Amino acid sequence: MTAELLDTGVVVIARNEGERLQRCLASVLGDGATVVYADSHSTDGSVEHARSLGVHVVELDPAGLMNAPRGRNEGFRKLLEVHPEVEYVFFIDGDCQLVEGWLRRARAVLEADPTLGAVCGRRVEIAPQDSIYNLITDVEWNTPVGETCACGGDVLVRVEALRQVGGYNVGMSCGEDPEMCFRLREKGWRLERIEGDMTRHDVALLRFRPWWKRHARGGYAYAHGAALHAYGPEWFNFRRCANILFWGALWPLACLVAAPFTSGWSLLGLSAYGYLWWKVRRWRIGLGDEPSIAGRYAAFVGLGKFAEAQGVLQCLFDLATRRQSVYVEYKDYQEEVRA
């Protein structure tokens, strides 16, 4: 057992991840960290497998919301129950594998800088060659190293900081990670993305529909976060949502509606998407991507604006009608649930 990780806990969340979860648990065991698995009503034997490894298990009551923030919060509460002295907690999704050595390095970074509330690293797709959607997702994970505004689902958080903000917002169907990070920064905590691979992820996007659904979910998350915090000093997510609605709805609609009155000349306005492609491609090349990959990524960013706009509009409708949308998963093997 690694002595420096005795003050560290790991919370794994999953639902019906099968072999992915088995690989995830195998990757986080053995370093001395206390491991808790929060299960969202799996039917594939995940709970039994976790218990067979000696992992502490929390089974979410299916009568409540079955979402990631609830799983993380309940897993965190269980961690505090079995290990009250824990100082750091690493959250990881069940379709990821922890890269050996990363947790020790990240913990050392947090210990060395008491102003840091959370640390993350590079999430890497295990099979980017399997589909263009996997490849685009792998590029998406490659964010700049250094101080950052948000971390994703895989993140090492200082327990003191997480307690201050009250954990994750269980009312969010998605986008709970940047929203929690926003509240950390409001409390004065800094966030950092450090060099090196953190986790290996299996996004398993092999068809267009789940890719579209994932981006629509992203738009929904941006809009929900903006609705919660847009009127603060930072206008959280407001500019991002405005950008999505402009490119994904307002601009193409304006070009089409004006076409009968301009003898079709207004359709030339759609060439602005070429500028968007060029801008995104140049940005990704500046981050070190190969030009061919940057070009494909930029094309899907433009297409993704339409999916994200769908998600933004759906969120606005749900908020206006006081409906609650629960996205269980976007992958082929699981379904979306709307309540």
Image (cartoon, rainbow, N blue to C red):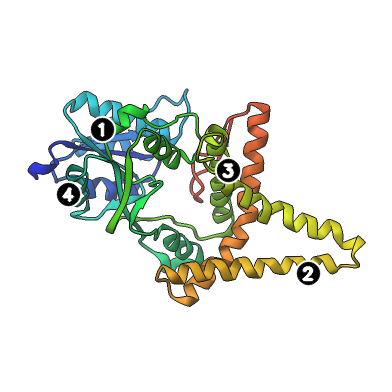
Relative to 235, does residue 145 appear above or below in the rendering?
Answer: below
The residue singled out by tag 4 in the image is 104
Residue 197, percent from left and from top: 28, 59
The residue located at (39%, 40%) in the rendering is 181
Under mark 4, the amino acid is: Arg
Furthest residue in direction front, as rendered = 233
- State the residue at coordinates (41%, 30%): 70
Query: What is the three-letter code of the residue carrying label 1?
Result: Val
- Tell me the crowding category of disc 3: few under 14, some 14 to 19, or many 20 or more residues within 10 angstroms, Cα based: some
Q: Of tags 2 and 3, which is closer to the observer?
A: 3
Q: CA distance from mark 4 to mark 2?
A: 54 Å
Query: In the image, which is nearer the foreground, mark 4 or mark 2?
Result: 2
Q: Earlier in the sequence, mark 4 or mark 3?
A: 4
Q: Residues within 10 Å of mark 1 (few under 14, many from 20)?
A: many
Judging depth in this view, the residue of 19 and 253 nearest the camera is 253
Tell me the SS state at disc 4.
Answer: helix
Q: Secondary structure at mark 3?
A: helix
Q: Quadrant of residue 318?
A: top right
Q: Position of residue 81 (x, y in %)?
A: 22, 23
What residue is pinned by disc 1?
A: 159
Residue 134 appears in the figure: yes
Circles 4 and 2, Cβ within 8 Å, touching? The answer is no
Please give the residue where the numbered disc 3 appears in the rendered image.
238
| Circle 3: residue type | Phe
Residue closest to the eye, 214 or 255: 255
Q: Earlier in the sequence, mark 1 or mark 2?
A: 1
Do the numbered discs 2 and 3 sit on residues whose CB atoms are within 8 Å?
no
